[in-house]
Image (cartoon, grey):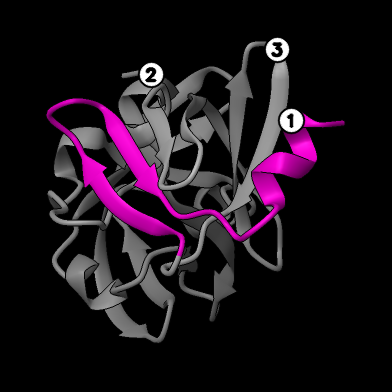
Amino acid sequence: MTKDECYRLGNITKPFGYKGQMVFYLDVDSPQDYADLDSVFIETKTGLVPYFFKVDNINGNKAVVTFEDLTPDEAHALAGHDLYLPLDLLPKLTGNQFYFHEVIGFRVVDSQYGDIGTLQSIIEYPAQPLFQIDKEGKEILIPIIDPVIKLVDRENKTLHIDAPNGLIELYLNS
Protein backbone atom coordinates (compact mmCIF):
# COMPACT_ATOMS: atom_id res chain seq x y z
CA MET A 1 0.00 0.00 0.00
CA THR A 2 1.41 3.40 -0.98
CA LYS A 3 0.45 6.90 0.14
CA ASP A 4 -0.98 7.56 -3.34
CA GLU A 5 -3.54 4.81 -2.70
CA CYS A 6 -4.53 6.27 0.69
CA TYR A 7 -5.93 9.34 2.34
CA ARG A 8 -4.60 10.92 5.51
CA LEU A 9 -6.94 10.22 8.42
CA GLY A 10 -5.01 12.19 11.03
CA ASN A 11 -2.07 11.55 13.33
CA ILE A 12 -1.05 10.06 16.64
CA THR A 13 -0.64 12.92 19.09
CA LYS A 14 0.45 11.57 22.48
CA PRO A 15 0.20 8.79 25.05
CA PHE A 16 -2.91 8.55 27.22
CA GLY A 17 -2.22 7.20 30.70
CA TYR A 18 0.53 4.70 31.37
CA LYS A 19 -0.90 1.45 29.96
CA GLY A 20 0.05 2.06 26.33
CA GLN A 21 -3.08 3.87 25.18
CA MET A 22 -2.54 6.54 22.54
CA VAL A 23 -4.51 9.56 21.31
CA PHE A 24 -5.39 9.79 17.61
CA TYR A 25 -6.31 13.19 16.18
CA LEU A 26 -8.89 12.43 13.46
CA ASP A 27 -8.73 15.14 10.80
CA VAL A 28 -12.23 14.40 9.47
CA ASP A 29 -15.67 16.02 9.51
CA SER A 30 -17.41 13.15 11.33
CA PRO A 31 -15.05 11.39 13.77
CA GLN A 32 -17.88 9.14 15.03
CA ASP A 33 -17.90 7.46 11.60
CA TYR A 34 -14.58 5.89 12.65
CA ALA A 35 -15.71 4.51 16.03
CA ASP A 36 -15.64 0.92 14.70
CA LEU A 37 -12.26 1.28 13.01
CA ASP A 38 -9.85 -1.49 14.02
CA SER A 39 -6.79 -0.85 11.85
CA VAL A 40 -4.89 1.91 10.07
CA PHE A 41 -1.71 2.33 8.11
CA ILE A 42 0.92 4.30 10.00
CA GLU A 43 3.67 6.10 8.13
CA THR A 44 7.09 4.93 9.27
CA LYS A 45 10.59 5.31 7.86
CA THR A 46 10.06 2.15 5.80
CA GLY A 47 6.65 3.20 4.41
CA LEU A 48 3.06 2.51 5.42
CA VAL A 49 2.68 -0.28 7.98
CA PRO A 50 -0.67 -1.73 9.13
CA TYR A 51 -1.43 -1.58 12.87
CA PHE A 52 -4.42 -3.04 14.70
CA PHE A 53 -6.10 -1.48 17.72
CA LYS A 54 -9.30 -1.07 19.70
CA VAL A 55 -11.01 2.33 19.97
CA ASP A 56 -11.60 2.98 23.68
CA ASN A 57 -13.51 6.25 23.22
CA ILE A 58 -13.97 9.19 20.88
CA ASN A 59 -14.42 12.74 22.12
CA GLY A 60 -14.63 15.39 19.43
CA ASN A 61 -11.81 14.79 16.95
CA LYS A 62 -9.75 12.78 19.42
CA ALA A 63 -9.88 9.01 19.84
CA VAL A 64 -8.17 7.07 22.62
CA VAL A 65 -6.99 3.69 21.31
CA THR A 66 -5.20 0.61 22.60
CA PHE A 67 -2.89 -1.10 20.11
CA GLU A 68 -2.88 -4.87 19.79
CA ASP A 69 0.42 -6.66 20.35
CA LEU A 70 2.43 -3.54 21.26
CA THR A 71 4.11 -2.77 24.54
CA PRO A 72 3.45 0.67 26.04
CA ASP A 73 6.94 1.77 24.96
CA GLU A 74 6.35 0.60 21.37
CA ALA A 75 2.99 2.42 21.30
CA HIS A 76 4.52 5.61 22.73
CA ALA A 77 7.20 5.55 20.00
CA LEU A 78 4.43 6.02 17.40
CA ALA A 79 3.54 9.51 18.69
CA GLY A 80 3.76 12.08 15.91
CA HIS A 81 3.21 9.59 13.07
CA ASP A 82 0.50 10.11 10.44
CA LEU A 83 -2.47 7.75 10.01
CA TYR A 84 -3.73 6.59 6.59
CA LEU A 85 -6.63 4.56 5.21
CA PRO A 86 -7.18 3.23 1.66
CA LEU A 87 -9.00 5.61 -0.70
CA ASP A 88 -11.74 3.05 -1.32
CA LEU A 89 -12.86 3.48 2.31
CA LEU A 90 -13.81 7.12 1.70
CA PRO A 91 -17.58 7.59 1.58
CA LYS A 92 -18.74 8.53 -1.92
CA LEU A 93 -19.76 12.18 -2.17
CA THR A 94 -22.49 13.45 -4.45
CA GLY A 95 -23.65 16.80 -5.75
CA ASN A 96 -21.23 19.68 -5.25
CA GLN A 97 -19.38 17.99 -2.40
CA PHE A 98 -15.95 16.65 -3.35
CA TYR A 99 -12.66 15.49 -1.95
CA PHE A 100 -9.74 17.66 -2.93
CA HIS A 101 -7.83 14.77 -4.51
CA GLU A 102 -10.73 13.78 -6.79
CA VAL A 103 -11.01 17.11 -8.68
CA ILE A 104 -7.31 17.55 -9.54
CA GLY A 105 -7.08 17.56 -13.35
CA PHE A 106 -10.68 18.74 -13.85
CA ARG A 107 -11.33 21.52 -16.36
CA VAL A 108 -12.55 24.68 -14.62
CA VAL A 109 -15.34 26.63 -16.31
CA ASP A 110 -16.28 30.09 -15.02
CA SER A 111 -19.78 31.50 -15.59
CA GLN A 112 -18.33 34.70 -17.09
CA TYR A 113 -15.01 33.64 -18.70
CA GLY A 114 -15.82 30.09 -19.79
CA ASP A 115 -13.01 27.51 -19.73
CA ILE A 116 -10.24 29.03 -17.59
CA GLY A 117 -7.91 26.04 -17.44
CA THR A 118 -7.04 22.84 -15.61
CA LEU A 119 -7.10 22.45 -11.85
CA GLN A 120 -3.48 21.70 -10.96
CA SER A 121 -3.70 21.47 -7.18
CA ILE A 122 -5.41 22.64 -4.03
CA ILE A 123 -3.43 25.01 -1.83
CA GLU A 124 -4.49 24.64 1.79
CA TYR A 125 -4.15 27.90 3.69
CA PRO A 126 -5.40 28.34 7.26
CA ALA A 127 -8.01 30.92 6.26
CA GLN A 128 -9.38 28.92 3.32
CA PRO A 129 -8.14 26.58 0.60
CA LEU A 130 -7.59 27.76 -2.97
CA PHE A 131 -7.95 26.17 -6.38
CA GLN A 132 -4.66 26.51 -8.29
CA ILE A 133 -5.59 26.62 -11.98
CA ASP A 134 -3.24 26.67 -14.96
CA LYS A 135 -4.41 28.67 -17.99
CA GLU A 136 -1.77 28.43 -20.70
CA GLY A 137 1.09 28.94 -18.24
CA LYS A 138 -0.66 31.56 -16.12
CA GLU A 139 -1.65 30.71 -12.57
CA ILE A 140 -5.15 31.55 -11.35
CA LEU A 141 -6.07 31.17 -7.67
CA ILE A 142 -9.75 30.89 -6.75
CA PRO A 143 -11.06 30.57 -3.17
CA ILE A 144 -12.87 27.32 -2.41
CA ILE A 145 -16.09 28.58 -0.90
CA ASP A 146 -19.66 27.38 -1.43
CA PRO A 147 -20.91 30.49 -3.33
CA VAL A 148 -18.14 30.04 -5.94
CA ILE A 149 -18.78 26.34 -6.71
CA LYS A 150 -21.80 25.94 -8.97
CA LEU A 151 -21.48 22.36 -10.29
CA VAL A 152 -19.11 19.43 -9.90
CA ASP A 153 -19.53 17.36 -13.08
CA ARG A 154 -17.69 14.13 -12.30
CA GLU A 155 -18.76 12.45 -15.54
CA ASN A 156 -17.16 15.14 -17.73
CA LYS A 157 -14.41 15.99 -15.22
CA THR A 158 -15.49 19.63 -15.14
CA LEU A 159 -15.83 22.08 -12.28
CA HIS A 160 -18.24 24.96 -12.92
CA ILE A 161 -17.61 28.09 -10.85
CA ASP A 162 -18.76 31.67 -10.48
CA ALA A 163 -15.56 33.49 -9.50
CA PRO A 164 -15.75 36.80 -7.64
CA ASN A 165 -16.02 39.78 -10.02
CA GLY A 166 -12.67 40.90 -11.37
CA LEU A 167 -10.63 38.04 -9.85
CA ILE A 168 -9.92 36.09 -13.04
CA GLU A 169 -9.34 39.31 -14.97
CA LEU A 170 -6.69 40.26 -12.40
CA TYR A 171 -4.69 37.13 -13.21
CA LEU A 172 -5.16 37.18 -16.98
CA ASN A 173 -4.26 40.87 -17.43
CA SER A 174 -1.18 40.85 -15.21
Find out whether residue 62 is within the magenta segment: no
Q: Which residue lies furthest to the front in this view?
A: 112
Task: Choose between 24 and 78: the one closer to the eye.
Answer: 24
Q: In this view, does 172 lie above or below 32?
A: above
In three-dimensional space, the C-alpha distance between marks 1 and 3, rounded to whole angstroms, equals: 10 Å
Tell us which disc is closer to us: 1 or 3: 1
| Residue 53 location (% of width, % of height) | 27, 56
Residue 170, given in percent of the width and then of the height, sits at 78, 43
The residue pinned by badge 1 equals: 172
Relative vertical location of residue 56 with respect to residue 10 in this rendering, above or below: below
Q: Where in the figure is residue 7, as x and y percent of width and height?
A: 37, 39
- How crowded pointer 1 is (Cα within 10 Å; few <14, some 14-19, many 20+) is rated as few
Label 2 Cα neighbours within 10 Å, binned few <14 / some 14-19 / many ≥20: few
Q: Residue 2 carries which label?
A: 2
The mark closer to the camera, 2 or 1, is 1
34 to the left or right of 169:
left
Image position, residue 98 (x, y; %)? 29, 50
Q: Which mark is residue 68?
A: none
Q: Range of the magenta residues?
A: 148-174
Check the image and report above or below for 76 versus 90.
below
Residue for point 38% across, 74% down: 63
Instruction: Name the amino acid type tagged 1.
Output: Leu
Kindly check if marks 3 and 2 are in contact, taking CB atoms under 8 A apart as contact.
no
Horizontal placement of 44 versus 42: left or right?
Answer: right
Of pointers 3 and 2, the one earlier in the residue sequence = 2
Foreground label between 3 and 2: 3
State the quadrant of the N terminus. Answer: top left
Three-letter amino acid code at the position of disc 2: Thr
**Tag 1 secondary structure:** helix
Which of the 4 quarters of the picture holds residue 140? top right
